[in-house]
Amino acid sequence: MGRIVQKFGGTSVGSVERIQNVAKRIIHEVDAGNEVVVVVSAMGKTTDELVKLATEISGNPSKREMDMLLTTGEQITIALLTMALHQEGYKAQSLTGWQAGIQTEDAFSNARILDIDSKRISSLLEEGHIVVVAGFQGLIPETKDIATLGRGGSDTTAVALAAALKAERCDIYTDVTGVYTTDPRVVNSARKLPSISYDEMLEMANLGAGVLHPRAVEFAKNYNITLEVRSSMSEERGTLVEEEVSMEQNLMVRGLAFEGNITKITVSSVPNEMHALAELFTILASNGINVDIIIQNVLNEEKTNISFSIESNSLSATQEVLAAHQGKLGFESISYEQGLAKVSIVGSGMISNPGVAAKMFKALSDEEIMIKMVSTSEIKVSTVVKQEDMIKSIETLHDVFELDARVPVQNT
Ligand code: ADP
Ligand code: ASP
Ligand code: MG
């Protein structure tokens, strides 16, 4: 008998029929002799609708109240799914995040899970219950306030519970049949990957592939939990996210990720002094501004330009912070370019293959796509391009790196 965690995303529980379908998938595992903990998201687009309601009331709603509001979505699903399980004649109980013992740091809207006290879940399992836990939420122990884990955070609830409960498996059921070479809703020829390593998946998730929450992949890597990403609507096997990828070893590029809504800021004529960079980025960080790619362009011995990319929705905050510190930082002016996007290639085989970045830049320039910024790590290359060139860039790179054509190499 094994202990397993199953997570079902919003689309998978988007209607009464789908909740009943999910109940059947859970029962299938219970009948096979497993102890099952289920994590669910809010139904369909509920979270988006709740966000919209809040913005109709306030342009800048309190983060505490926002979390209070958004956590109601998951609470609806746990109750309905548990009723569906009862209806099928099974013992089941629903738990909110705090009832399940999920403790978070003291931060609203994007809190990290710090600890899980899994006693209540364990005793329910021992009594023969299926335990249905609300994803995306936890409790701040000091204040007893409810906090959310960031959009897409139900994946993280599931993997963290799998770690705490020493589960044998963690299955992530979603609305696609696995992790693809890139978003299959954007590129028709995207191909499902049989497996992907933690490090590659972490890069993909951090670079915009919304199929898994980045922190879920971090937990899986840290606790060595194999995830299977698969569809709740079909029996097809999904993608394994695991330490060692047995097939298709050493691929130069395993996948592509992309995200829009990026703005490039240029701070011009900053004094070219030892502490200038440290000062600028300390001020931005202490004001909660998340900076991604940074480029320094030294003009002469006295002056340097510094460019960096941010999410477009932090543009006005960034401008305000920089303007307030212009005297201290000593720059001449600020300019910005909106409407940009980041397109990235990811693959662990890049480490040993020089020329991958060159191949990427050549492919984009052949299509007359202007690259505005670049950043690299051992297993990824990211380029910033105009948002209007984003889809063409991905399609081009998908072709150039032959991501659709590759026949998996079978182990012998
Ligand atoms: P859920 O509600 O089940 O958590 P999400 O919408 O969060 O579902 O994630 C699934 C979606 O992720 C897919 O519908 C797909 O559009 C998107 N996606 C982005 N990149 C990828 C990728 N590389 N492989 C598969 N899906 C991807
Ligand atoms: N319901 C939350 C969201 O839409 C959490 C999740 O689905 O993972 O972001
Ligand atoms: Mg999701």
Image (tube, grey):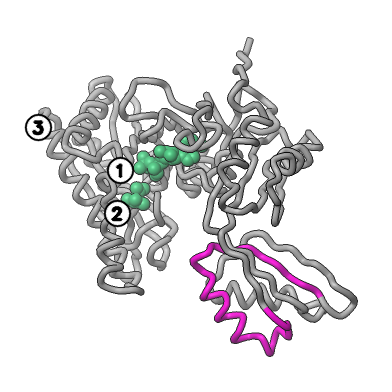
In the picture provided, is 405 more to the left or to the right than 231? right
Check mark 1 vs ligand 1: CB closer than 8 Å? yes or no. Answer: yes
Q: Is residue 307 magenta-colored? A: yes
Choose top left, top right, bottom left or bottom right for residue 299. bottom right
Q: Looking at numbered disc 3 in the image, what kind of residue is underneath it?
A: Gln
Q: Position of residue 390 (x, y in %)?
A: 58, 46
Q: Position of residue 90 (x, y in %)?
A: 14, 30
In the picture provided, is 100 more to the left or to the right than 303? left
Check mark 2 vs ligand 2: CB closer than 8 Å? yes or no. Answer: yes
Task: Give the class, few, some or many, for how many residues have Cα within 10 Å of label 2's Cα (few <14, many ≥20).
Answer: many
Residue occupying the far right of the picture = 301
Segment tinted magenta in the rendering: 304-333
Q: Is residue 362 above or below residue 334?
A: above
Q: Are marks 2 and 1 in contact (CB under 8 Å)?
A: yes
Instruction: Please give the residue where the numbered disc 2 appears in the rendered image.
Output: 47
Q: Quadrant of the C terminus?
A: top right
Instruction: Please give the residue where the numbered disc 3 appears in the rendered image.
Output: 87
Q: Is residue 161 visible?
A: no
**In front here: 108 or 207?**
207
**In front here: 118 or 318?**
318
* Residue at x 41%, y 56% (from the top left corner): 150
Q: Looking at numbered disc 2 in the image, what kind of residue is underneath it?
A: Thr
Instruction: Please give the residue where the numbered disc 1 appears in the rendered image.
Output: 10
Q: Position of residue 379 (x, y in %)?
A: 68, 41
